[in-house]
Image (cartoon, rainbow, N blue to C red):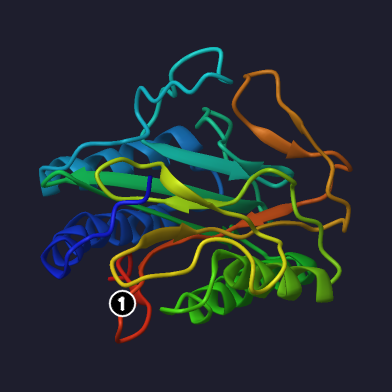
Amino acid sequence: MVELKTDVSIDAMRVPGRVVAQALTAVRQAARVGVSPRQLDVVAREVLHEAGATSPFLGYHPAFAPMPFPAVLCVSVNDAIVHGIPTDEPLRDGDLVSADFGAALGGWVGDSAVSFTVGTPRAADLRLIATAERALAAGIEAAVVGNRIGDIAHAVGTVCRDAGYGIPEGFGGHGIGRRMHEDPAVPNEGRPGRGMRLRHGMVLAIEPMLIGGGRDGYREAADGWTLVTGDGSRAAHVEHTVAITDAGPRVLTSL
């Protein structure tokens, strides 16, 4: 069931959305060679605390996971695609980091992700990240009243495939509102004109995930949470919470 949000509710969702943006900005600024993902999680926790918000990630326990998620921030490094558990392993020069974060405040949730490099970047990583960001922008541009979920999926997937990158099957965006994961699912690849029609008041988390090696295969890491590329290549993950409105798409997780 898809809940259509009122304009007042969309305004209310902007509040946790801004907290998410502030936390990811702080995480990106703190990320440097020698800093551990667990230290970045501490940075994100401090932003939550200062805002009076809580984490929809901490303690989240879906059926596939062997344990509740132990952090407020997902930190996926290099060949990790998504759901990386923060560790004490220091970041190294040239690492590619994807940080995914959510905040709950006032009964509403925001969710967003960014990818960036630490230290001296590889040109291939910069291209991968830039393509992920273009795919996200294309998905947001397609998130207009009257279009369908397939139009968003097609926009995202076309950018990814045209650049020669892989897309992990079965993972993508989702509805969001009072809970982090709501209907409908928002795939990262699909046929235009298919799926649920977009209406004013729908709020979606659009989140491209790209595999640099061009293949779609992935595997589950030993921790039971982290998804890593099957070919060992690097991955990028970006995301925004977006409201569908009669005036056009409204990004709720920007500063």
- x%, y% of residue 53? 16, 42
Instruction: Report whether 143 appears left or right of 42.
Output: right
Q: Tell which residue pokes out farthest to the top in this image.
A: 66
Instruction: Report whether 214 appears left or right of 235.
Output: right
Q: Is residue 198 above or below residue 223?
A: below
Quarter that holds the C terminus? bottom left
Quadrant housing residue 220: top right
Quadrant housing residue 91: top right
- What residue lies at 82% left-to-right and 76% top-to-bottom? 162
Observer-nearest residue: 19 or 116? 19
Q: Which residue is mark 1?
A: 245
- x%, y% of residue 121? 68, 66
Q: Tell which residue pokes out farthest to the bottom in this image.
A: 247
Observer-nearest residue: 183 or 171? 183
Instruction: Report whether 205 appears left or right of 156.
Output: left
Instruction: Report whether 159 appears left or right of 101.
Output: right
- x%, y% of residue 238? 54, 60
Q: Is residue 38 above or below residue 162?
A: above
User: Judging from the image, what secondary structure is the residue with disc 1 in?
Assistant: loop
Q: Is residue 216 above or below residue 238?
A: above
Q: Amino acid at mark 1?
A: Thr
Q: Is residue 252 above or below residue 32?
A: below
Quarter that holds the N terminus? top left
- What residue lies at 37% left-to-right and 70% top-to-bottom? 199
Observer-nearest residue: 161 or 255? 161
- What residue lies at 32% left-to-right and 36% top-to-bottom? 42
